[in-house]
């Protein structure tokens, strides 16, 4: 079965992007894809294949060694939220102060930023924990604060670097659903790095499978659009899609030198 | 009994036992005061001579406090400069190490010759001793910021000043406070050593000078009384800085948060 609705305008385009670090490590080679506005795409690949490097280049945190990253709307390039693999919170600040950080850094006054942060925390199910410090929160709750921080500034683009990899399965499933609900409500463009076939199929509408280092895009698999039928995670269709994506991943691993 | 109560009671118990044995030994063997006075005699001397010892205590504490204050301001400021510029750090840090490893007694006479005001000379000497732990620890702390948090600040286009104030300084706080606790004791040691050196010229009136003065006249209980004041000052400084550290870190840092179970 093939999927894909009406083609939306590309927001982001990567052409022949490569990255070689100063130590000589070639992280990615010749990566190219486009991402439509409002899309949800998973970058899937084995550990060390350069997925995170691609995300960091898109965020502008590191520069490509070769190739070009182009945005159709320059404002979107400056309106990015980023969620790291660990929660990356400031331990000396409350959940509210952490979630308010992007707004405060953009010059918003403390009261307005705090109110927006409270709303973002409530949206990820953390109402009542605004004054808690990160050390008093569980791993899942810390990750929710991280998600709230990314959401507080209402970004047009959300980049997520294996955000739920360190969490237990129950918490991960719950956060998957919360993320999907936020994405559907707000329509931000999402690039989600993961090494979990199951997570990529559950969340994304498209999976880009990367080869081992130096990473390249080896397969571009379209998935059914959201919203999906209730019980999708236990459906035969989900199992079949996981098999397909898993097969693509096995293929690139087998072809690797 | 709680852990907190034990922390207070056990050292007090040890102190009571040691002082008791000391007093018993001095009395039993009839040790004369000019060899080793007992704790009771030292306490009586402290009470009797408080009027003359207390001004010296304040002089020593004033030098200690000012030296620590200048060490904090200069140490944090220089650490911030080091954090902002790798080149400056590479160029200047070795000289900070030189300052640290040079014995203060070796350069004290020079400082006394060069600086006319003896109070300022004492301050400089105590500062030299207290400065390095704050500089070193704060520099490490400012550079020990989580790389992802640093990336996040870059992503949101935070300038260097805001990154310093909102990210690097709070991250460095536990390191700075650890350095401050070391420097508090060192500032007192620096002040006392400086007074010893300066005191030989007869121009200082801190506790160290009182010890020298008492030694010349064989007033050994008075020597011990002055020494007890220095020890008590050191303990008080350590406790005060530990309390400050706990107050600032108790909500978020593992070093200040009790662990259950």
Image: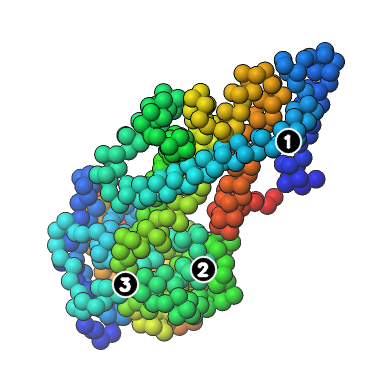
Q: To which residue does mark 3 refer?
A: A80
Q: To which residue does mark 2 refer?
A: A95
Most foreground residue, B113 or A203 = B113
Is the residue at mark 3 from the same chain as the one at mark 2? Answer: yes
What is the distance, in whole Å, between disc 1 and disc 3 at their CAs?
56 Å
Disc 1 vs disc 3: Cβ atoms closer than 8 Å? no
Residue at the image position 72 percent from the left and 41 percent from the top: B7
Which residue extends farthest right? Answer: B28
The mark closer to the camera, 2 or 1, is 1
| Residue A225 horizontal side relative to residue B40, left or right | left
The mark closer to the camera, 1 or 3, is 1
**Quarter of the figure with residue B206:** top right
| Residue A57 horizontal side relative to residue B9, left or right | left
| Residue B49 appears in the rendering | yes
The mark closer to the camera, 3 or 2, is 2
| Residue B6 horizontal side relative to residue A6, left or right | right
Count neighbours of disc 1 (C-alpha within 10 A) and say few if under 14, some if 14 to 19, many if 20 or more: few
Most foreground residue, B212 or A41 = B212
Q: To which residue does mark 1 refer?
A: B11
Count neighbours of disc 3 (C-alpha within 10 A) and say few if under 14, some if 14 to 19, many if 20 or more: many
């Amino acid at each position: 079965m093939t999927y894909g609705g009406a083609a939306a305008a590309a927001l982001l385009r990567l052409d022949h992007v490569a990255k070689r670090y100063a130590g000589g490590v070639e992280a990615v080679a010749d990566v190219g894809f486009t991402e439509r506005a409002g899309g949800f795409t998973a970058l899937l690949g084995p550990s060390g294949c350069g997925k995170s490097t691609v995300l960091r280049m898109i965020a502008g945190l590191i520069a490509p060694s070769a190739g070009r990253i182009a945005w159709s709307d320059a404002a979107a390039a400056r309106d990015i939220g980023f969620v790291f693999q660990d929660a990356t919170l400031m331990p000396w600040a409350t959940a509210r102060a952490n979630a308010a950080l992007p707004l405060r850094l953009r010059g918003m006054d403390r009261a307005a930023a705090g109110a927006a942060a409270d709303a973002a925390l409530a949206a990820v199910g953390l109402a009542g924990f605004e004054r808690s410090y990160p050390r008093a929160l569980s791993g899942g709750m810390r990750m929710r604060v991280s998600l709230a921080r990314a959401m507080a500034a209402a970004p047009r683009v959300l980049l997520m670097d294996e955000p739920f990899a360190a969490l237990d399965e129950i918490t991960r499933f719950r956060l998957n659903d919360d993320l999907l609900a936020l994405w559907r409500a707000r329509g931000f463009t999402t690039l989600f790095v993961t090494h979990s076939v199951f997570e990529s199929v559950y969340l994304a509408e498209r999976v880009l499978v990367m080869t081992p280092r130096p990473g390249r895009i080896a397969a571009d698999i379209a998935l059914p659009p959201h919203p999906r039928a209730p019980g999708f995670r236990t459906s035969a269709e989900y199992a079949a899609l996981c098999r397909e994506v898993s097969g693509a991943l096995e293929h690139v691993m087998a072809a690797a030198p | 009994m709680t852990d907190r109560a034990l922390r207070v009671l056990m050292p007090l118990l040890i102190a009571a036992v040691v002082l008791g044995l000391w007093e018993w030994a001095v009395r039993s063997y009839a040790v004369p005061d000019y060899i080793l006075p007992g704790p009771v005699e030292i306490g009586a001397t402290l009470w009797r001579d408080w009027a003359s010892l207390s001004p010296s205590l304040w002089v020593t504490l004033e030098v200690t406090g000012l030296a620590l204050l200048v060490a904090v301001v200069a140490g944090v400021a220089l650490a911030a400069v080091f954090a902002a510029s790798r080149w400056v750090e590479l160029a200047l840090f070795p000289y900070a190490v030189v300052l640290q490893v040079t014995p203060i007694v070796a350069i004290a006479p020079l400082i006394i010759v060069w600086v006319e005001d003896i109070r300022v000379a004492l301050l400089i000497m105590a500062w030299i001793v207290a400065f390095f732990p704050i500089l070193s620890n704060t520099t490490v702390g400012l550079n020990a910021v989580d790389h992802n948090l640093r990336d996040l600040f870059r992503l949101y286009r935070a300038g260097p000043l805001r990154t310093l104030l909102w990210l690097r300084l709070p991250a460095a706080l536990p390191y700075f406070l650890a350095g401050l606790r070391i420097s508090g004791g060192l500032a007192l040691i620096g002040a006392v050593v400086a007074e010893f050196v300066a005191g030989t010229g007869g121009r200082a009136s801190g506790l160290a000078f009182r010890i020298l003065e008492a030694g010349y006249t064989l007033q050994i209980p008075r020597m011990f009384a002055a020494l007890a004041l220095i020890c008590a000052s050191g303990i008080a400084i350590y406790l005060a800085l530990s309390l400050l550290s706990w107050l600032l870190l108790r909500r978020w840092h593992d070093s200040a948060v009790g662990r259950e179970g």
